[in-house]
Image (tube, rainbow, N blue to C red):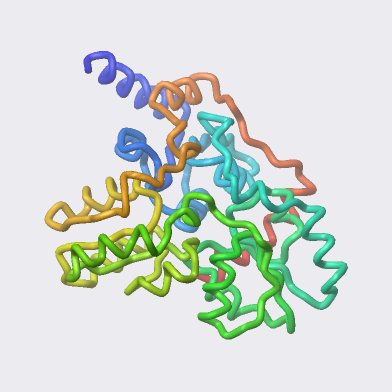
Amino acid sequence: MEGGEILLERIQVLKKERKAVILAHNYQPPEIQDLADFVGDSLGLARRAAEVDAEVIVFCGVHFMAETAAILNPDRVTVLPEPKAGCPLADTVTPEGIRTLRNLYPRAAVVTYVNSTAAVKAESDYCCTSGNAVEVVRAVEASQIIFTPDKNLGHYVQKMTGRELIIWEGCCPIHDRITVEMVRPLAEKHPRALIIAHPECRPEVLEMAHEVASTSGMFGVVERTDRTEYIILTEAGMGYPLQKRFPEKTFLFPSPEPLCEDMKRITLEKVERALRTLEPRVTVPEDVRRRALRAVERMLEIG
């Protein structure tokens, strides 16, 4: 434990020297969340990245999140402590795929989930997060909308907006792994529990939920309801920040899984090294950044 305390002290000294800010996603390991200046979901962290007064951004998340910070902050240094922290969902869509769909549907606007690479964002008209996807699609005036890359989120948005979407067939393997068969026994055992599901879950799982919300949105649901038990359908690491904020309440998951291995790759040692060396640095080519920035800014403007 003594070594851990020394490591934490070293991180704080380096953070001050580098004039750095540490951002962490809600799925990060507890010790990373406790260390961070700001913890949140993709939308909240994107806003923080745009607003923060710092020379260095240490992004504790996955690669597309650090890229988004770099898109918004070209004059700052953005580092991702573990460069292998990727996203299987983001890997399902390519710039070439977007261009192919544009050729097939030339009148369509492209709305791309923020869980995507900078190159894919650059081919898109709008970005969105799970927290504002419905609002973004409602704001699009085009007669047709291509929605990429998460099919489950796309079907949810289609249901909520009543708009016909051309939906890319990608999915988050973590959320898609949650099934009705996993949830039903837990709901039967805890009949008074409120079920909150992330919109990346399958449609039939969302049908079981009392509320559908992004990870940060889940805090709001818990805050405004008076239940003592909640069944949470998302990455199981979400239990830590929820329990930390609402210690008097009980949060249940279908199992200790699902856990996103990519979100768990970052350690205190890697954060210290990133601050000390300012590596691995995340950069986006300027021509790609400028085009991606338009879609990201629209995401931030809409909600």
Seen as rendered, the residue at the extreme top is: 3
Who's the residue at 70% across and 73% down the image? 166
Q: How many marks?
A: 0
Q: Is residue 5 left or right of residue 257?
A: left
Does residue 4 appear anywhere in the picture? yes
Who's the residue at 36% across and 72% down the image? 208
Seen as rendered, the residue at the extreme right is: 103
Q: Is residue 238 left or right of residue 249?
A: right
Does residue 73 appear anywhere in the picture? no
Q: Is residue 197 above or below residue 50?
A: below
Q: In which quarter of the image is the N terminus?
A: top left
26 or 35, which is in the foreground?
Answer: 26
Who's the residue at 66% across and 46% down the image? 91
Residue 171: % across, % down = 58, 56
205 or 224, which is in the foreground?
Answer: 205
Who's the residue at 58% across and 80% down the image? 138
Residue 99, by quadrant, is bottom right
Residue 198: % across, % down = 42, 62
Q: Is residue 287 above or below residue 59?
A: below
Seen as rendered, the residue at the extreme left is: 248
Q: In this view, does 109 lie above or below 69?
A: below
